[in-house]
Image (spheres, rainbow, N blue to C red):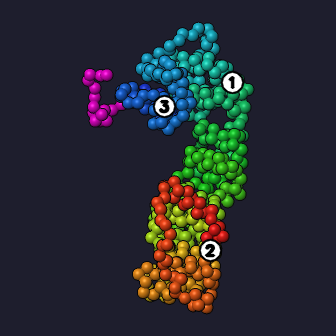
Amino acid sequence: MSVVKFSSDFLIDTFTLVDNLFIIEHMPYLDEKQIKVYLYGLYLCAVPEKQNTLDALCSTLDMTEAEVMSAYGYFEDMGLCRIISKSPLEIAYLSIKKANQPPKKYRGEKWNDFNIQLQQLFPERQIMPNEYNEYYMFLDSTRIEQDAMLMIVQYCINLKGMGVRYPYILTVARNWAADGVRTVADVEEKLKEYENQSEDMRMVLSALGRKGGAELEDKQFLLKWTRSWGYELDAILAAVKSLKGGKTFSKLDAKLDEFYRMSIFTVEQIKDYQTQMERLKALAIAVNKNLGVYYESLEHELEVYIAPWTAKGFDDGALIALAHYCYITSVRTLEGMNNVVNKFFSLGLLTEASIDEYLRAQIAQDGKIRKIIEKCGSSRQVTQNDRDLYRTWTADWGFDDDIILFAAAQAVGRTYPTPYINQLLSAYRKNGVSTVEQAEKFGMGAQQPQKANFEQRDYSDEELRSIITSIDKLSEDDV
């Protein structure tokens, strides 16, 4: 444990120094993930008390172990760091200035012709020994032919001009090597692929509103979309039209990646998907309006609520009607509405017509219950308990409204009229009374509580639990 150390506040107010050589020589040729790994690792070097493990690094940067290891493998090739141990991971960041000094000596005769031809490609500047050494290490590790490497250098010069730096060239060569490029014939085939896509590239650039020629990264994107993912040009152009805001190759790549994961490949499928998304957005806006809420962005709502609801089979009108129902019953959140939607799903009510029929039936039923309440001499609102009892009286016990109203009239003046009606109808059911005429003849005597004339006893918890558990198994013959 350190005796003296910086406080967390002090560390937050300080800086992580990045060598300008890294910014000039390396950063322009790194991808986003590589930059994140290098900079965050550099920060951890200065803050040793931070969680400094591979798992913590992956969690913080939202990257996989393979991606982190790949980045550090590249940095080691470039002389920016040294991998001391892979398990557990231990990385030593190296001085960039010293990294420019060749760590390995190569026999000059092996590279004489390569050195001469490489220098001839850059007549405006002198190639330094450390740059030669980077080429040597790369060629040794990838087994790319020297003549093939020189062709790659020439291609990069044609693309970027004489100012192109060797990290960019090696990045291109590394990407091509990953595609199996090793020989002059392989390079010629790769260049032929780029040449064959020139007209397609021109149309993509035009659709994106880009002026000027295509960058190497653009060509690699187009090759991936067409050769690896199997997209035709018309589908790619249709995907361009679906982009919102600034249209770039990166955004187009993200959109096509989304389509690829959803197995959407043709123009018709893309158009249908876009139409569906526009419909869902319009539905979300209508739901929000009826629910009394507003969200500037609809992406979360579409993913978490609208799309799953429609996937269950609800039509648009049904969801809008349920949103209005939620509003008038003081449910004012999407999560609250989700509970209501799930309830109607369990009832099998998925269309506007079926929900409207259900609600009308409920309103009509509440009207009948209200008459029963008024018959008792009360003017209170209908409750869920009233609805449950009415369902028991009608659906389970088989009484019609006339005899229920007759029983309600007998409860006038009672402190608790509803329980009295329940007791009275229970007595009717037990004695086979099913009409008003029979109820009038039955009289009131049978409705009075009977005094217990049996010996009472105490029951154990186990006995009571057994009785309660068996209630659901009782049949009408047992009552």
**Could you say which is closer to the camera, residue 164 or residue 476?**
476
Q: Which residue is mark 2?
A: 396
Task: Give how far across and how far down residue 12 sits, in percent.
Answer: 31, 35
Task: Kindly state the secondary structure of the residue where label 2 is placed.
Answer: helix
Badge 1 or badge 2: first in the primary sequence:
1
Badge 2 or badge 3: first in the primary sequence:
3
Extent of the magenta region: 1-19
Q: Quadrant of the C terminus?
A: bottom right
Task: Give how far across and how far down residue 346 sits, in percent.
Answer: 61, 64
**Could you say which is closer to the camera, residue 141 or residue 92?**
92
**Is residue 261 rendered to the left or right of residue 130?**
right
Q: CA distance from mark 1 to mark 2?
A: 82 Å
Q: CA distance from mark 3 to mark 1?
A: 35 Å
**Is residue 212 rendered to the left or right of residue 232?**
left
Q: Which residue is mark 1?
A: 182
In front: mark 1 or mark 2?
2
**Identity of the residue drawn at 31% across and 22% down:** 1
Q: Type of residue at label 1?
A: Arg
**Identity of the residue drawn at 49% across and 87% down:** 410
Q: Type of residue at label 2?
A: Asp
> Do we see residue 239 in this rendering?
yes
Q: Which residue is mark 3?
A: 55
Badge 3 or badge 1: first in the primary sequence:
3
- Quarter occupied by residue 64: top right
Above or below, 257 relative to 48: below
- Quarter occupied by residue 67: top right
- Quarter occupied by residue 47: top left
